[in-house]
Amino acid sequence: MKTNDNKLSDGSKTPEQTIVIKTELILPAMANLMNSLQGGQMMHFMDIAGALTCRKHAGYEVATVAVDKIEFRHPVQVGEVITITSKLIWVGRTSMKVKINAVSENLKSGETKMTNTAFFTYVALDDNGHPVSVPRLCPQTEEEKNAFNSEQRAYDAQKVTNADA
Ligand SMILES: CC(C)(COP(=O)(O)OP(=O)(O)OC[C@H]1O[C@@H](n2cnc3c(N)ncnc32)[C@H](O)[C@@H]1OP(=O)(O)O)[C@@H](O)C(=O)NCCC(=O)NCCS
């Protein structure tokens, strides 16, 4: 598991600094009847990587509160290796959203495939299990800024919807 966790002086981080990379060899016990990785097992791996990204950013325990837009594009066969990359794209007050990608690699042929993408949201929790505020995220690149602003608009719109309900 690789991470890059140098914090800025106020505890905030750039998205690049939140990246967690998790590598797994797919074993028969993780497979379905077609000899490929079970979807739930993949989600478990992704959830662990995303939680670690947020746990390290927040400095608190985190709970998964939402999973969005999860895609399974290609099966991952037993004996292949998957590399899961998790990166923080937005933070609110206590909530954090990560983008997670999974890439499979056939070690014999060297072929790689982007098999999964998903967005997971976590909430930081204090010792009493109550939501607690998290450090800022400082997007640097145009892509990071666009992703952050897009998520902020969705969050603001959801707040208005909730207030109207
Ligand atoms: C996490 C939990 C304590 C939050 O409680 P809550 O009453 O929803 O708290 P709040 O209303 O103050 O919301 C806290 C944050 O979560 C966000 N949130 C809550 N539900 C959400 C959802 N479905 N999608 C996205 N964000 C959500 C809120 O927007 C808020 O974010 P903000 O502080 O950045 O504005 C509670 O939802 C919980 O215990 N859920 C179960 C978690 C769990 O068991 N996960 C699986 C195991 S890890």
Image (cartoon, rainbow, N blue to C red):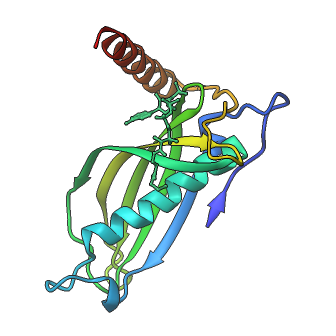
- The C terminus - image quarter: top left
> Farthest front residue?
128
Q: Position of residue 126 (x, y in %)?
A: 69, 43
- The N terminus - image quarter: bottom right
> Farthest left residue?
34
Q: Is residue 7 left or right of residue 159?
A: right
What residue lies at 48% left-to-right and 24% top-to-bottom? 148
Vertical placement of residue 132 versus 50, above or below:
above
Q: Is residue 35 left or right of residue 135?
A: left
Vertical placement of residue 132 versus 64, above or below:
above
> Farthest right residue?
9
Q: Is residue 161 left or right of residue 64?
A: left
Q: Residue 88: which quarter of the image?
A: top right
Most foreground residue, 120 or 66: 66
Q: Position of residue 62 (x, y in %)?
A: 58, 49
Q: Is residue 87 left or right of residue 163?
A: right
Most foreground residue, 136 or 81: 136
Report the number of numbered marks.
0
Q: Position of residue 159 (x, y in %)?
A: 40, 15
Most foreground residue, 60 or 150: 60
What residue lies at 14% left-to-right and 83% top-to-bottom? 34
What residue lies at 52% left-to-right and 45% top-to-bottom? 87
What residue lies at 29% left-to-right and 68% top-to-bottom? 40
Q: Position of residue 132 (x, y in %)?
A: 66, 34
